[in-house]
Amino acid sequence: MLIVVIVMLILATPFSALAAQLSGAALHVEGADIEVSFEEGDLSLPRASILDWISESACAVTEYYGHFPVRHLRVVIVPLDYGKGVVFGRTFIPGPAPVIRVMIGRAASESDLHADWVMTHEMVHLAFPAVPEQHHWIEEGIATYVEPIARAQIGDLTAGKVWRDLVDGLPHGLPAAGDRGLDNTHTWGRTYWGGALFCLLADVEIHRRTNNKFGLQDALRAIAKAGNMLDDWPLTRTLKIGDDAIGIPVLIKLYDKMKDAPFDPNLPKLWQDLGVKVAGGSVAFDPKAPLAAIVTSIMKPRADRSVCARRAMSTWTISSSDF
Ligand SMILES: [Zn+2]
């Protein structure tokens, strides 16, 4: 039962004190509706800050894909008495609309939210059709790889941070002794970082073969236009849609190489070719490296930037009751 509905524009000074007392909110972003509700519990942050964080994540995903991946989404925020910052997130489909459930520690701060990857990671999951369980690595790999790039494209992360995390994280995705390929090796490292490795190799190869006309972002945009997490598709059908969009079968060929064999791509050589060198807590980019233009092209925001990503306007509808 709605008692009060107030439409607020989130601009430079986002929210009134009223928002802190309200129990639910809805964001309309680029043709999609995101409904947010809060479960019982205390948070030291005002709810307005949490809505702002959800909005930022939605903008990053909208910018990367060119649209928000589903028409309706429910986000449930669960305050916890323990844990630091954003503790855990999960996306599932209990009915006609997907739900992202995120647990936040009571003491979470503004900077915890700003540094957090969970909300964007979960929203990226919405943009890829559900595939059979043995291919779970592609779902987590895309979320792991796309999340920081999407956040960098709207200015929330630096390119140095994105590539430093790839240099640190991707070795976890390399095959160990006894590995039987991504479809048959369901460890944490091979699922999250092995999947991200697949994405990076595909991205570099698409950029290389199309002379930076296309990248993985174009393939994933085509896939997200054709379907989303509400669809159950065979992986090969999904990959073919991506390949058709860029005009070359990069995704299918790389999948054939990595699905049931322990392919090791020689990461040190790849970093050298891309001109990515570890420097302190970040990386230095060598513009003279043979594939340096690929790094620039991967990170570049698209020309067709969304209204949301330009921060022109995000509209929240705040209500005094739960949805
Ligand atoms: Zn995930």
Image (cartoon, rainbow, N blue to C red):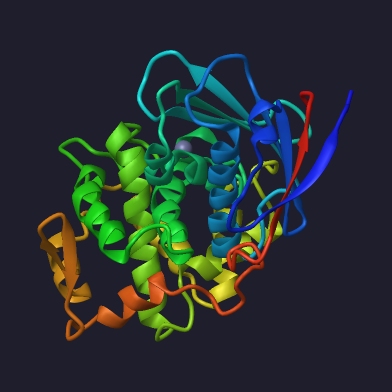
Residue at 72%, 30% (x, y): give it: 24
Residue at 31% from the left image edge and 31% from the top image edge = 187
User: Viewer-proximal residue, 276 or 203?
Assistant: 276
Q: Position of residue 52 (x, y in %)?
A: 57, 45
Give the vertical position of 3 relative to 221 (above or below).
Answer: above
The reply to whether residue 260 is in sight is: no
For this view, does 97 lie left or right of residue 199? right
Residue 82 position in % (x across, y down) = 39, 15
Q: Quadrant of residue 130?
A: top right
Q: Position of residue 227 (x, y in %)?
A: 69, 53
From the viewer's perspective, is residue 173 above or below residue 74? below
**Quadrant in the picture for the C terminus:** top right
Q: Along the line of sight, which residue is nearer the eye, 127 or 249?
A: 127
* Residue found at x 51% / y 41%: 119
Q: Residue at x 78, y 34 (%)?
A: 96
Whether residue 131 is visible here, answered yes or no, is yes
Figure check: 211 above or below 256: below
Seen from this angle, which residue lies furthest front?
17
Q: Nearer the viewer, residue 81 or 35?
A: 81
Q: Position of residue 154 (x, y in %)?
A: 48, 64
